[in-house]
Image (cartoon, grey):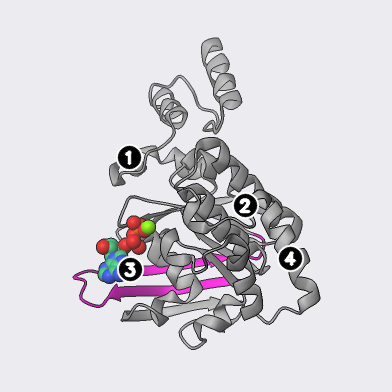
Amino acid sequence: MIKIEGLVFRYDGSPRDALNDISLDIEEGDFVGIIGPSGAGKSTLTYALNGVVPHHYSGNFRGRVEICGMDTAKAGPEAISKYVGSVFQDIEGQILSSVVEDEILFGLENFGIPRGEIEPRVEYALKTAGISELRHRNISSLSGGQKQKVALASIIALRPKIMALDEPTGELDPQSSRRVFETLKELNERHGLTIVVVEQKIMMLCEFAHRLVVMDEGRIAAEGPAREVLRRGGMLEEIGVNIPRIATLARKLRGLGLYDGITPLNLAEAEKMMRNGRQC
Ligand SMILES: Nc1ncnc2c1ncn2[C@@H]1O[C@H](COP(=O)(O)OP(=O)(O)O)[C@@H](O)[C@H]1O
Ligand SMILES: [Mg+2]
């Protein structure tokens, strides 16, 4: 579904590569979480998925990004947007309309969706994003978190095969963030959407993503199921990723020879770890 091979990208005028030899395969129906310190290249990687790189930002682009068999360097951003829906980190720059409903209609009309299909799609998108009551609101009156949900609703309406989301819960409290992730899970499981999400809330990713990709200085520093990636806690701390305290605790107990089980990803598993530890 997504195939990245030897991708290198350096923004014009930048002294170093924002992406440095990235190779990554993402299968249809995958749910991939991207973490890494600030400046690691996470946003740039999402730009490479939706064609913003190399079509919007000029720079030195090498390697290959294939989306559903389409070479993104050759296809235009519009063709790519038929497959990839994006929520950008800079939400203000993404929203173009002044009223919520118009923002969703804008994309649907641009895509040439038949009239009869438009209303059910708008309703579904608003409901799925949990903002039905905001339909007629002026976007300038919304909070940052509500705007993030509007951006999410506007891509849900377009029914892309892939969603590339760059910190979509950055403005949301933990409870609303969880609701967004539950929505993503439903879209992933029920509709087979492939999801690539950059997220700082690592526990959330551990719970929802099938796989984590850790980026550092434009490279992939680690990749795999959350549990395996978290086992390498020392490396993650070194590059500046805040790992969950229970994973650090498991690593320390392991180092002391007091525990050799799985890395706990939630409180129930942590409790089990502590109980087993006491029996040792
Ligand atoms: N528009 C731009 N022009 C020049 N350099 C940029 C631009 N956007 C990002 N960069 C640089 O590319 C690198 C990766 O940035 P980014 O992808 O935004 O990282 P992250 O999302 O992980 O914080 C950083 O060194 C950043 O300064
Ligand atoms: Mg970023």
Q: Secondary structure at mark 1?
A: helix
Q: From the top left corner, tell me how far across and down residue 49 is, in percent.
A: 49, 71
Judge whether residue 218 can be spotted in this image: no
**Residue 180 within the segment the image draws in magenta:** no
Name the residue beneath numbered marker 3. Answer: 20
Three-letter residue code for mark 4: Arg
Quadrant assignment for the N terminus: bottom right
Q: Nearer the viewer, residue 44 or 178?
A: 178
Q: From the top left corner, tell me how far across and down residue 229 is, in percent.
A: 47, 45
Mark-to-mark CA distance, 1 and 2: 41 Å
Mark-to-mark CA distance, 2 and 4: 16 Å
Q: Answer with mark 1 or mark 2, whichever residue precedes in sequence.
A: 2
Three-letter residue code for mark 3: Asn
Give the magenta-colored segment's residue range. 1-29
Q: Identify the disc placed on residue 121.
A: 4
Q: Secondary structure at mark 2?
A: helix
> Mark 1 against mark 2, which lies toward the viewer?
2
Q: Identify the disc placed on residue 237.
A: 1
Q: Nearer the viewer, residue 269 or 252?
A: 269
> Mark 1 against mark 4, which lies toward the viewer?
4
Name the residue beneath numbered marker 2. Answer: 134
